């Protein structure tokens, strides 16, 4: 089906589906069970975003084979069980994530092939087991980081839009012959979701975050492997830096400060502090919620867009990543200080 026709069909269909879920109180986000969810919203919202992404990827994309569709369905189901509070153990959830990613990598053999770091590349090139589990680890970091940033309206889905747009930009800038049908389809699907999400009418949830992060993570590994003489691995790092750094920073923060298990959600992420700051100034919760996601994604887009013009210049890309991490840390601690002063 043509992308444009599908978009026009899914927009009213998604509206009616969302209305049906809300009216019948089906698949509503259990915000009262999570501080991570109820800090910026006090009403139940349908977890329809993940379902929209799932249906689109499984039934309308053209490049996935049947095994990939089956395993991505397992990823979606795992996220949905987490959303519905049917799987509360972070450790057990992490084990299942690892097992499903293991199966995905085992069947499609889509592994990271280089990093331009001498010793690490030596291990990747000479030890398949290291290459395999290094890829698995990176996808786990991305998956859980994408879940961590799904805390304000528009942030997670908006960031995935930023990634897709910049893949298309970089491919166009450097005449990289990619098959873009599936990416453009996903871009349009996420645009539909974003319209609802910015007005707190639909959530992506763990199901959507898990599914999108694994799909795009695997796509970018393949993108780099196919065009490694044109693309620096640090361009891929730039595209994925925010959810990956959010996860790793959260692990260190909790380990050092709270000594807690890293997969428990809390309200001490950058987007939470930015929301509290904006809400203090604007005093409109829903507007502050959506603005938080839009501001973070706008800043990310500017610097990733810059990097999309230097996709094989490792030095420039590393400098952009370092700068973004610096901005993140400065913003985080300034906003945290403001938050503590106004508690």
Image (tube, helix red, strand yellow):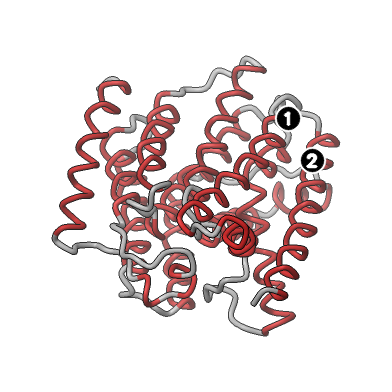
Vertical arrangement, residue 5 with respect to residue 209, above or below = above
Give the SS element for disc 2: helix
Q: Nearer the viewer, residue 13 or 201?
A: 201
Q: Is residue 297 visible?
A: yes
Give the structural element (helix, strand or loop) at label 1.
helix
Instruction: Indicate which disc residue 218 carries.
Output: none
Residue at position x 62%, y 83% in the image: 260
Q: Position of residue 290 (x, y in %)?
A: 50, 50
Q: Residue at x 57, y 38 (%)?
A: 220
Q: Residue at x 63, y 57 (%)?
A: 134
Q: Looking at the image, which residue sits at the far top?
A: 175
Q: Position of residue 233 (x, y in %)?
A: 71, 39
Picture quadrant of residue 181: top left
Question: Disc 2 or 1, which lies upstream in sequence?
Answer: 1
Q: Position of residue 230 (x, y in %)?
A: 71, 25
Q: Which residue occupies the foreground of this view, 230 or 291?
A: 291
Crowdedness near tag 2: few (<14), some (14–19) or many (≥20) residues, C-alpha within 10 Å: some
Q: Which mark is residue 306?
A: 1
Q: Is residue 45 above or below residue 86?
A: above
- Do labels 2 and 1 touch, CB within 8 Å? yes
Is 78 on the left or on the right of 39, as rendered? left
Residue at image location 38% in from the left, 53% down from the top: 200
Give the quadrant of the N terminus.
top left
Q: Any mark on residue 320, and which? A: 2
Q: Nearer the viewer, residue 166 or 313?
A: 166
The quadrant of the rendering that contains the C terminus is bottom right
Q: Is residue 117 left or right of residue 154?
A: right
The percent coordinates of residue 114 (x first, y second) are 71, 43
Residue 280, quarter of picture? bottom right
């Amino acid at each position: 089906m043509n992308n444009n026709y599908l978009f026009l069909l899914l927009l009213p269909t998604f509206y009616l589906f969302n209305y049906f879920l809300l009216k019948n109180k089906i698949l509503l986000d259990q915000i009262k069970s999570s501080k991570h969810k109820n800090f910026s919203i006090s009403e139940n919202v349908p977890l329809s975003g993940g379902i929209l992404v799932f249906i689109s990827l499984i039934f309308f994309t053209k490049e996935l084979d049947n095994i990939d569709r089956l395993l991505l369905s397992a990823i979606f189901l795992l996220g949905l069980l987490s959303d519905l509070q049917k799987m509360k153990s972070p450790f057990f959830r992490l084990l299942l994530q690892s097992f499903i990613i293991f199966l995905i990598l085992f069947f499609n053999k889509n592994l990271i092939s280089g990093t331009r770091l001498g010793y690490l590349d030596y291990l990747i090139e000479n030890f398949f087991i290291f290459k395999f589990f290094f890829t698995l680890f990176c996808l786990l970091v991305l998956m859980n980081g994408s879940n961590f940033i799904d805390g304000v309206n528009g942030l997670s889905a908006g960031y995935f839009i930023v990634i897709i747009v910049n893949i298309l930009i970089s491919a166009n800038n450097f005449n990289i012959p990619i098959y873009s049908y599936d990416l453009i389809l996903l871009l349009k699907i996420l645009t539909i979701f974003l319209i609802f999400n910015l007005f707190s009418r639909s959530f992506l949830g763990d199901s959507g975050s898990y599914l999108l992060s694994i799909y795009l993570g695997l796509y970018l590994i393949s993108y780099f492997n196919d065009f490694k003489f044109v693309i620096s691995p640090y361009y891929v790092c730039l595209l994925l830096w925010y959810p990956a750094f959010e996860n790793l920073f959260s692990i260190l923060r909790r380990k050092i400060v709270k000594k807690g298990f890293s997969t428990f959600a809390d309200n001490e992420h950058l987007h939470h502090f930015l929301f509290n700051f904006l809400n203090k100034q604007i005093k409109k919760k829903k507007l502050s919620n959506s603005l938080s996601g839009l501001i973070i994604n706008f800043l990310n887009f500017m610097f990733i867009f810059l990097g999309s013009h230097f996709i094989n210049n490792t030095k420039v890309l590393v400098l952009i990543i370092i700068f973004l991490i610096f901005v993140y840390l400065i913003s985080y601690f300034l906003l945290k200080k403001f938050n503590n002063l106004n508690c």
